[in-house]
Each structure stands twice: as C-alpha cells, then as structure tokens.
C-alpha cells in the first residue's frame, strides 16, 4: 500500500534493573513499545533476560496483536529490549522482525535498532569475503556480524561498538541487551533520537520520551550523539565516539521528527514536539498570511500547526474536517468508485463551518498530495468559497537515506513540480510552505542542530555510494524548482 506520508521505520525500547529485583521488564517494555506504536505498525517484538536465558517473542502486527497476557506472564526478568517496525521496501517476513538474538562465544546478545546504515552493502560484501553468512538484507544483521567480528579483538562490547561506529555510516539509534548489561548508542550526528529514563532502580532507553511518561519514568537526559551508554549492576556509564563537550552542539536530529514522526507529547533533544508544531504554524502565518474566515487543520497531522496559525493570524480556528478513525490500513479500493467512496468514508466535513467561507487549511507536509487534493475537493463540495493551503514544512525535494520510508521516492510531489504547479494540481486557490529557516527556529530550546536533508539535500552523514552521482544529476535539478 502506498503511504501518503513518510513513515519512521522503527521505535526502540530497553530497560535494565540495576538491583535485579524487577520481574516485569518485559511487561514494562510492552507498555513502552505500545507508546511507540506510531513509529512502526508492521511488527513488534520483545526479548527478556529470564535469569540468564534470553526469551523472545515477536510477530507481525500491532503490539496488542502480537502479545497477550500469557506471553508477558511467562517472560519474567530484570532486563528487556523491545522494537516496533515499519517495513522498508526490500524487506518483509519474520526474519527481519526485531529484536534479533544471537549467541556467540562472548555470550548472548539481543539487538533493536532504528535507522539505516548507508554503507551496509559494502560492509556485507567485505564480511562475506571473510566467511560471514547472512540470512537477510537487513542492516541489523550487518551490525551483529560486525560486532561479533570486532568482539574477538576487543576487551569489552563497548570497544567493539566504538570500533563499529568508525566503520558504519548513516543514522541509527540502537539498544543492545547482553548477559549482564543494556547498552544504547546513537550515531555520531544523533540523527535518530534516543533518550534515557529512570524508574526506581531501573534505567530505560527509548526512542521517545512519551514512552517514559507512559510507564511513569522520569527523564534523565538524551543519549548524546556518538555516545555509548552502558547500564549494568554498577549503574550507568558512558563512552564517546565524538568529543562529549561538543556532541550535542554538533548533532543533527532529524527535523521530520518535529514535522510529523514524533508523538506530540514527546520532548526530543530539549525541544517539545507539540510546541515546535504550534511555533511552526505561527511562523507560517507570519510568512504566508491569508485573508480568510477560518483556519482548518488537515486531520490529524495538521492540528498543532493550524492552532499556531490561528493564534498568530487572529483568524478563528474551526473543526471543519473530521477523520473516521475506524478506517483500516487494508481498506480495499480496487475501482475508481471505491477510491472516491473511501475518501468520503475517511474524511467528512462539518458543512455549517465551511459553507460560503474562505478557508485556509493547514497541513504538516505534502509528500504525495493525494489526501490533500481530496480534502480540498470535499471542502469545495461542502460550499467553501475559497480554499487556501498552508504547509508547515518546506517542499520535500529529496529522498531520505537515514531510515525513513516513502512508498516511492520518485513520487515526491515537490521534486516533480513547482509550488505553483502543485497548488494547481491539488486544486488550492493558493499554496505556501513555511521556510526551512522558519521551521528550524520553531524547534525552540533544541540542544542540537538539524538534519533537514529531505528539504535541502545536504545529507550530513553522506549518501549511499550507488546514489552519489545520480543524486546531484537528478535531485538537485528538482531543488531548483520554486
Ligand atoms: Fe529526517 Fe529528512 Fe534527514 Fe531523513 S532526510 S533524517 S526524514 S530530515
């Protein structure tokens, strides 16, 4: 199924009780990954340290579908890792569901990771030359194989991880459980998020702070870009791949977390997601004002930005577009008639809020544009006099190589068309996007910089070798469109 929005590929979670008195690590992990469900709905898994034996359960589907009380009742232990996943375009099937477990000479290991290793192909080939065997094309298998190889010549797993960080390129936040510790690490630029929490004598690692809130844990701090955090019976300690003092300042957190991916109640690297979205709406109102009667949010992703737009512009906020929450992802729509029906079933309009009015509709982003076009059409059908579109992120002109999936990167609306053309295509009376500067400034309080490569094409962690040449020829051409 083609996605209308870009999707984060994964969420990771881990817990370790330093006093080893906790028995419910798997159950807490269940609540943790349930809170990270928005980061991946394809599969879910948990591995628990059950008195020295690693017990895992995982499967396709939502967290609530994969686990029941029986599983969780059997999975007792003081440490666990969990994962939710969205599939990338190449991988499916049970082999790629995380966490992945291995047993090696150095002990047991379970890994859960979020992100993408852009030189995974090259490393895989090198390791194969040395006799390594791979069962999938998933990045985590490359990480495991590298770790196993590096561990042979290292005194500890942290050394093996630091060595690996020098060999891999890309964006990743990873949680690893070993026999006696929980380790979390973040790529040297901190493109993918990872935060530390604490509850009683347990430390927690999570992709987002919302999962810490949901289990009643307090936020300790973010894992720094390039930091390797170890939690064991001795408490928490850290090693660093980049200088600790400048790690946060030089970091580049994915700005799309603020646009769309992260849950509104999360705080990432010091910045509130909800407040950032409201601020972006305010910036949008300043940069692209509109003489209208009512501000309407594209449900549900545009709500915070629409509130900001209304606050700044003084135009009233109206709840004109409603979304049917019971439309499943597998809603069958084989014919044109069925597709039209599905739009009408998915979204409805409060006609009294719309009829005869000039509407400004605010959305967080446009990737394919299909839903936006449909929303504008149903507002017009309901009697709107004018429909203007304001977008709380700049035009998406470049693909993402750092662990974010679009169903077909060639369909990026803004790469194919200019802003005027997009406005015409989707049927808006006017269209404007917030500037990248406006979006960056909206992430108030952030302790690091941003990756904004899908907007500006800079790719701070590099791009896969295979796309190096075509990127400048093809995508930079798209970036010239205004
Ligand atoms: Fe995020 Fe875009 Fe950078 Fe990918 S390219 S990490 S989606 S900001």
Image (tube, rainbow, N blue to C red):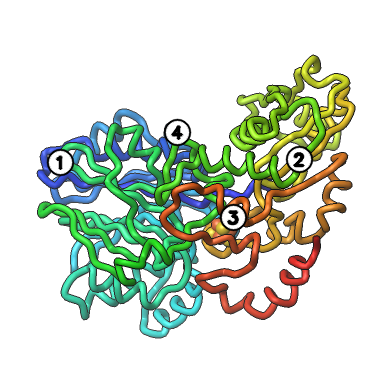
Q: Is residue 378 above or below residue 1?
A: above
Instruction: Depth check: give the residue in front, 36 or 236.
Output: 236
The residue at 22%/62% (across/down) is 238
Q: Residue furthest top?
A: 352
Proximity of marks 1 and 3: CB atoms separated by less than 8 Å:
no
Quadrant position of the C terminus in the picture: bottom right
Does ligand 1 reach within 8 Å of label 4's beta carbon? Answer: no
Q: State the CA–CA distance, disc 2 to disc 3.
A: 32 Å
Q: Earlier in the sequence, mark 2 or mark 1?
A: 1
Local packing at callout 1 (Cα closer than 10 Å; few below 14, some 14-19, many 20+) is some
Mark 3, residue position: 405
Q: Secondary structure at mark 2?
A: loop
> Residue 332, located in which quarter of the rendered image?
top right
Mark 4, residue position: 65
Proximity of marks 2 and 3: CB atoms separated by less than 8 Å:
no
Local packing at callout 3 (Cα closer than 10 Å; few below 14, some 14-19, many 20+) is many
Q: State the CA–CA distance, disc 2 to disc 4.
A: 45 Å
Mark 1, residue position: 201
Q: Position of residue 465 (x, y in %)?
A: 58, 79
Q: Is residue 272 visible?
A: yes
Q: Earlier in the sequence, mark 2 or mark 4?
A: 4
Pair 4/1: label in front: 1
Mark 2, residue position: 289
The residue at 76%/30% (across/down) is 342
Q: Is residue 156 above or below residue 267?
A: below
Pair 2/3: label in front: 2
Pair 1/3: label in front: 1
Residue 340 left/right relative to 173: right
Proximity of marks 2 and 4: CB atoms separated by less than 8 Å:
no
Q: Position of residue 42 (x, y in %)?
A: 51, 44
Q: Residue furthest bottom?
A: 129
């Amino acid at each position: 199924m083609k996605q209308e929005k870009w999707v984060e590929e994964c969420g990771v979670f881990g817990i370790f009780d330093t006093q080893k008195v906790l028995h419910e690590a798997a159950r807490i992990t269940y609540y943790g990954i349930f809170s990270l469900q928005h980061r991946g709905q394809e599969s879910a898994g948990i591995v628990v340290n059950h008195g020295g034996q690693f017990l895992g359960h995982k499967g396709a589907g939502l967290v609530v579908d994969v686990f029941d009380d029986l599983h969780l009742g059997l999975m007792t232990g003081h440490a666990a890792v969990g994962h939710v996943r969205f599939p990338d375009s190449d991988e499916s099937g049970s082999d790629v569901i995380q966490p992945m477990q291995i047993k090696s000479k150095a002990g047991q290991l379970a890994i859960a990771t979020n992100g993408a290793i852009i030189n995974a192909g090259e490393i895989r080939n090198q390791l194969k030359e040395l006799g390594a065997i791979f069962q999938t094309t998933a990045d985590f298998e490359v990480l495991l194989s590298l770790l196993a190889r590096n561990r042979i010549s290292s005194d500890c797993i942290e050394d093996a991880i630091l060595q690996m960080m020098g060999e891999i390129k890309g964006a990743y936040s990873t949680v690893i459980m070993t026999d006696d510790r929980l380790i979390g690490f973040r790529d040297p630029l901190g493109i993918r998020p990872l935060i530390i929490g604490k509850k009683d004598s347990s430390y927690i690692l999570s992709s987002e702070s919302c999962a810490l809130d949901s289990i009643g844990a307090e936020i300790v701090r973010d894992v720094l870009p390039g930091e390797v955090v170890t939690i064991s019976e001795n408490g928490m300690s850290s090693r660093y791949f980049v200088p600790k003092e400048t790690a946060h300042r030089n970091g580049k957190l994915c700005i799309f977390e603020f646009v769309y991916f992260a849950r509104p109640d999360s705080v990432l690297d010091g910045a509130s997601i909800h407040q950032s979205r409201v601020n972006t709406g305010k910036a949008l109102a300043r940069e692209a004002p509109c003489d209208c009667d009512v501000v309407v949010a594209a449900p549900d992703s545009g709500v915070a930005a629409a509130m900001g737009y209304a606050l700044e512009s003084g135009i009233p906020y109206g709840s004109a577009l409603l979304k049917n929450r019971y439309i499943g992802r597998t809603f069958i729509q084989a014919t044109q008639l069925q597709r039209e029906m599905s739009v009408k079933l998915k979204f409805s309009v409060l006609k009294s809020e719309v009829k005869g009015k000039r509407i400004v509709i605010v959305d967080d982003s446009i990737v394919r544009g299909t839903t936006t076009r449909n929303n504008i059409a149903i507002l017009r059908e309901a009697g709107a006099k004018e429909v203007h579109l304001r977008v709380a992120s700049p035009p998406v002109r470049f693909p993402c190589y750092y662990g974010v999936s679009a169903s077909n990167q060639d369909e990026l609306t803004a790469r194919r068309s200019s802003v005027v053309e997009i406005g015409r295509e989707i049927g808006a009376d006017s269209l404007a996007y917030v500037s990248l500067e406006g979006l960056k400034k909206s992430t108030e309080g952030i302790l690091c910089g941003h990756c904004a490569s899908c907007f500006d094409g800079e790719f701070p962690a590099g791009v896969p070798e295979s796309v190096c040449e075509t990127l400048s020829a093809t995508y930079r051409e798209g970036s010239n469109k205004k």
